[in-house]
Image (cartoon, rainbow, N blue to C red):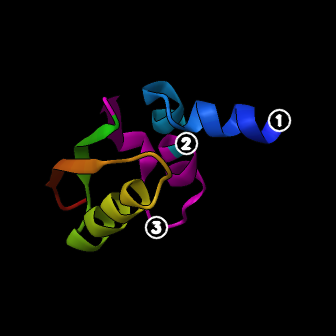
Amino acid sequence: GAAADEAAEALTDAGITAKIKSKMALDEFVKARRIDVDTSNWVVTLSGVVHSEAERDRAVRLARETAGVRSVIDRLRVESP
């Protein structure tokens, strides 16, 4: 039932994008509003601006740990606040 529907949604590109965006929005360390998440064929591209290498690493790790993600392309730029 619901679990199967949730699993199926997580494996769609839109589902993966939504899941990553919500993880970032809930994360205290990642400033999600400045990170663009795009998913195509289970490959996630992160672009936008972060304030530190640590924030970049955290954003990439959150994306990689999301179910259904095959790989992550990191196009994030580090800019001091």
Q: CA distance from mark 1 to mark 2?
A: 16 Å
Amino acid type indicated by mark 3: Phe
Instruction: Give the mark nearest the N terminus, 1 or 2.
Output: 1
Which residue does the image show at 43% across and 60% down from the upper left? 62
The total of numbered circles placed on residues is 3
- The three-letter code of the residue at mark 1 reads Ala
- Span highlighted in magenta in the image: 20-41
The image quarter containing residue 15 is: top right
Instruction: Tell me how far mark 3 sits from mark 1, CA to CA.
Output: 31 Å
Marked residue nearer the N-terminal end (2 or 3): 2
Image point (60%, 55%), residue name = 26
Mark 1 highlights which residue?
A: 2
Q: Say which residue appears at 48% left-offset and 46% top-offset.
A: 20
Residue 14, image x, y percentages: 48, 26
Q: Is residue 55 above or below residue 33?
A: below
SS at mark 1 in the image: helix
Return the residue at label 2: 19
Marker disc for residue 29:
3
Q: Amino acid at mark 2?
A: Lys
